[in-house]
Image: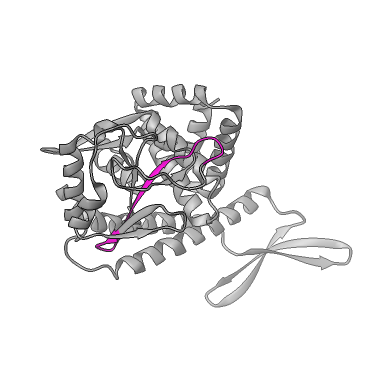
Amino acid sequence: MKDLKHMLEETVEFYREQERSIISALSSLPKGRIKKKKKGKRIYYYLQYRKEGKLIDEYIGKEVPQELLEALEKRKKLETELKEVRQALKLLKEEPKGEVYFLKPIEELFREFTKSGLWEEGIEVIGTWCFWLYQKYLSVPHYPLTTRDLDILIPLPYKGKKFNISGLLKELGFSENFNPDGSLYFTGYGMKIEFLAPQRGKGRSRPPYIKELKVTPQILRFMDLLLSHSITLKIARGLRISLPSPSAFFFHKILVSRRRKEPGKAEKDLKQAVYVGRYILQNPQEKEKLLGLWKTFPPSWKRRIKSSLKEAKENLPREVSLVESLEALLQ
């Protein structure tokens, strides 16, 4: 767990590398906007941009080449991405210096789960922390942990060992809170810990209270997918963490991205899925798991996944070839 303390430093370096990469890509793309001028009955097109403070109208012709339109659209997306990267760097400069102080209680939480055998009962770490652990221990391409929130997935119905999770978190200094639907979450040390469980069929009117664990998880769709294939990572002596397999994570992120109302979260889901996809393509065993899962999906899920991958090509211009490889695999 010691290497988790370098999380913020690695995140800053990631964004700096992203900034350099985007600036390099922008240098080879045209800038400006298309402007049309009418002379008599004819229309002529110009590329308008500023150079050394002067407004330049560069003649294009009677038609605008498709390649130019695509290049300008790519530039627009990269400029938006550059703005987001620089905003993230600005926010990271506001982080307190020194160790990431919330890690010690989280390490203690994971150790207690390991000692009590909760990972063997199907409980998993999911979400952004899961993705970050993939990066550290499975060599998944780097992408920063942009949130401190920890998501813990619990299978339903839960028939495992008893363990007072709420009591332990309170002992570790976290405060108990409730969502409007009655589900439980904890806050402390600048972070939020949530508990999630699968929603099936038409869903429940209220989230279930799991008396064996003393928690009330929020119920969400597609969580069964994450529980379908698990892996366990040995982090240190006496410390293990269970996670969904990269293949299950990949499909889950792709599917939930279609349900996101916030564009930023949808894009983050797609980015994490695509980066995990690179690892899957390079790992024969994981590729086999991916294809095995794909065969079990209903047609409606397959359509959603293909549609999301198409969207990923539009929103992640530097990952087009990677996404195309994933599309070719899922035919």
In the figure, is residue 11 to the left or right of 183? left
**Which residue is farthest bottom?**
53
* Residue interval drawn in magenta: 187-203
The quadrant the C terminus occupies is top right
**Which residue is farthest left?**
237
Reply above or below: 16 against 139.
below
Which residue lies at the image location 54% right of the left edge and 78% below the top edge? 53
Residue 199 highlighted magenta (yes or no):
yes
In the figure, is residue 225 to the left or right of 30? left
Viewer-side residue, 191 vs 268: 191
Which residue lies at the image location 55% right of the left edge and 45% below the top edge? 258
Corner quadrant of residue 177: bottom left
In the figure, is residue 125 to the left or right of 65? left
Corner quadrant of residue 189: bottom left
Residue 223 highlighted magenta (yes or no):
no
* Residue 29 visible in the displayed image: no
Give residue 83's position: percent from left, percent from top. 46, 64
Give residue 123's position: percent from left, percent from top. 30, 37
Viewer-side residue, 191 vs 179: 179
Give residue 199's position: percent from left, percent from top. 48, 39
Which residue lies at the image location 70% right of the left edge and 63% below the top edge? 46
Reply above or below: 119 against 186.
above
